Structure formats: C-alpha cells, structure tokens
Image: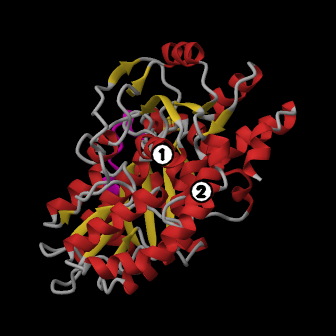
Amino acid sequence: MTLPDIATCAEPAPLRQRGQHEVFCGLTSIIWLHRKVQDAFFLVVGSRTCAHLLQSAAGVMIFSEPRFATAIMEERDLAGMADMHDELDGVVARLLERRPDIRMLVLVGSCPSEVIKFDLTRAATRLNARHAPRHRVIAYSGSGIETTFTQGEDNFLAALVADKATSRPAGAAAKLVVAGCLADVVEDQFARLFSELGLTGVVFLPGRDAINGLCVGPETRFILAQPYLGATAAALEARGARRIDAIFPLGAEGTSAWLRAICAAFRVDPARFDAVVAQPKRRAAAAMAHYRPWLQARRVFFFPDSQMEPSLARFLSREMGVALLEVGSPYLHREHVAGELALLPAGVTISEGQDVDRQIDRCRAANPDLIVCGLGLANPFEAEGRVSKWSIEFSFTPIQGFEQAGDLAELFARPLMRHAILTGGADRREAAR
Ligand code: SF4
C-alpha cells in the first residue's frame, strides 16, 4: 500500500471500554441500503421496537412506499403458540403478491428473532424453493445484540457475496470489486476515473441491481470503500479474492492513496495516474481551502458511531489542521484501519467500544470546540453551550472521492459557522471570505 509520509506519526494504543453504549443497531443501515439496491426489499423479522426504530430513522421516507418493512412478532409467536415459519411464509406470500417488482427479498434478523432462535437462513432456503427464480431470498442479522449500525451493511454484503458467488458462471469473474455502499453520484465518479485509468471489469458491491453482476474468483482483487466491512472481506477472501490494502477515499489525500493502491495492483502507469487525478485533486484542494479557516486548530472529540471515525479524524487532522482529542469507534478492525491509525497524530486518544458516562466525563473535561456524536447526545451537549456535529450524517451523505472533499469539510465546519452566527463571533467568518 502506498501511504503519504507517516514519519512524524506513531501508532497509538487504543483505550478499550465496555459499559453502557449509545449507538444504533444494524437495522439502521437498511435506510441507505434500500435506496441503493433498487430491486431489493428488506423485511425485518422483529418487534414493534424495530418498526419504530426504522420509522424514526427513515423520517419522511416512510411516506414514499419504501422497500422495507417489519414483520412484527406477536406474543403468540414468542410464546410458541404459532409456527413462526408458517407465519413468515404467509407474510412473504402476501408481500410478493402486492409488490411483484421485488427481485430480491432480504430477511433481516433482529434481537427478538435471535433470542427465540428463529433460523432465518433456513427460512430463506425454504422460501427460495418456493419463489425462485422470480424472487431470490437471502437473510442476514441486523440485531442490536450482534451488530452496531454500519455492521448491518457488512452482514448484508457478506450474505450477498456468499449467495451470488455460487450462482454465477465461472470465467466471468470481476477483475476489481469495490466493496461498500457508495452514493450513486460517487459510484459514477469512480467509474469514470477507473475508465480514464484504463481499468475494466470493475464491479461495485452493492450495485444498484442486487440480482445481476457479481462473480468472484481467484483472479479477483477487491478494495474496501468503507472501513466497517470485516465480514464482507472475509466472505470475498473465502471465494479466493485478494484485498488491496489502502486507506479510505475520504478527502484528497485519502482518495489519491486509495486510487493509487488500485493502480499499483493493476500496474497502471504512474504517469497516467498522475495525469488523471491532477485536475480533480486540484478541485478538491480548492473546495477544502474554503472551510479550512473554520476548522484550523479547532479541537475535536469523536464519540463512537460508524467505524468511519479513524478515517474522518485522519482527514480532519491532516487536511484541515484540526487538533484531535479523542477518536472513538465502536470497533476497530486492526488490519483494515492500520493505515488510518498510523496517520493519526501521536498522543491522540483512540477508544474502542464505549462506557458512555465515562466518555462524556472525558469529553467535558477536554472541553472540545466540536463534538461529533449521535443525536441522543448532541442536543444535551448543545444545551450545555457546546457545539456538536450529528455523526449519522456521514453515513447518509455522499462524502467519498475528490468531488465530495469540500462537502465533507463543510459537514464539520457548518455547526461552527452556525454557532459563530448565533453568538455574533465573526472572526472566522471574515477569515473564510
Ligand atoms: S434489532 Fe434489537 S436493538 Fe434493533 S430495534 Fe430491534 S430490538 Fe432494538
């Protein structure tokens, strides 16, 4: 892997804590997955709590007949008075009759379905026998017992790889799989760059179409576009694909390093690489420069949320001049984020897992200029006069690639700008003009 200069950086030892934690469960990733994969329907097998979570996370999307729903388990299901498999078969039959456009039905496990050991993989096999080839059925777990937020996407992609790899003909394997859900606009930009670099046989996972496209073989190389894909990487490796190691495509530096690693793996002429990325890199630098006065030397504290925190922190520290206080992540995949951790400045606290009360105490004591955290903590911090950035936005907003580097910087700068406007502080506004 080609990394920028890391001579001045040291790998910090993470602080590991277990206790009360304030994070989403893996079901939440359905909100962006169902928008991306346009022929799939996500059916959560869970409780009213799960349905309420999806409703509140999806916001106004629930009024647009979205491609997700919850099959709610009632008391009689939990008490064993009804056969869960029969009940599910009935729900699925009614759903597919009403929505014949569904090509792939995804059964998503939840805490209640896992606690009563309802085997959704077995249910998917049985439903496939009944509804194939018109509808394909797969299953994965998004429960809060097993998954945190973005890990839901990881489990979905791993299930997709395990399912599709066996069902495609040999000989048509992808040369490069880009794993990790990217907004359509970002996918299109990367596809254009790959074509300018002369790379062919590139497949995005997930694509917009769940049914077609993926074949993995021993000649396939894959690169992660998101840092939370441990199970997906393992599933791809189990099929013989080999990972290209890189930092993640956030900011101009991250995007360059990510593309350079791909080019090195496919022996693209370095001069061609430089020529292709020169212009977009310049545009990214110009867009980021606009927000640097707002972020330079600001002290930022990250609470754990999506596993994207080390990459976001690296971007802020190296490209925007931010001083990092603590970088929290729900889980650190040592191998996949090694490059990111090596690029964080010496002395920064890296924390894995959470004991939320102790972390809040550390945050208050550090008194940061900006706190990156979930909505459950954001407003209470704001009420204390602190400035917060709601972290879920980094999962919903297109932030990867050169053209989004300015937008990514803006996401961090905006709360500081708003605070300056509301409190009459004009210093950095003047600087930014
Ligand atoms: S899966 Fe578990 S944590 Fe998530 S909403 Fe359902 S009950 Fe809550």
Q: Position of residue 138 (x, y in %)?
A: 36, 62
Task: Please tell me which residue lies in front, 346 or 329.
Answer: 346
**Amino acid of disc 1:** Leu
Spatial CA distance of label 2 from label 1 is 14 Å
What is the span of residues highlighted in magenta in the rendered image? 113-123
Q: Secondary structure at mark 1?
A: helix
Q: Is residue 156 visible?
A: yes
Find residue 433 and report its horizontal and vertical position in percent.
77, 53
Three-letter amino acid code of the residue under disc 2 = Met
- Residue 208 in sight here: no
Asked if residue 257 is positioned above or below residue 300 in the image, the reply reads below
Does the segment drawn in magenta span residue 122?
yes
Residue bearing the label numbered 2? 288
Per the image, label 2 sits on a secondary structure element best described as helix
Q: Is 150 placed above or below 243 here?
A: above
In the picture, measured across the screen, residue 194 lies left or right of residue 188, that is left
Name the residue beneath numbered marker 1.
Answer: 312
In the figure, residue 259 lies in which quadrant? bottom left
Residue in the picture at 40% in, 27% down:
348
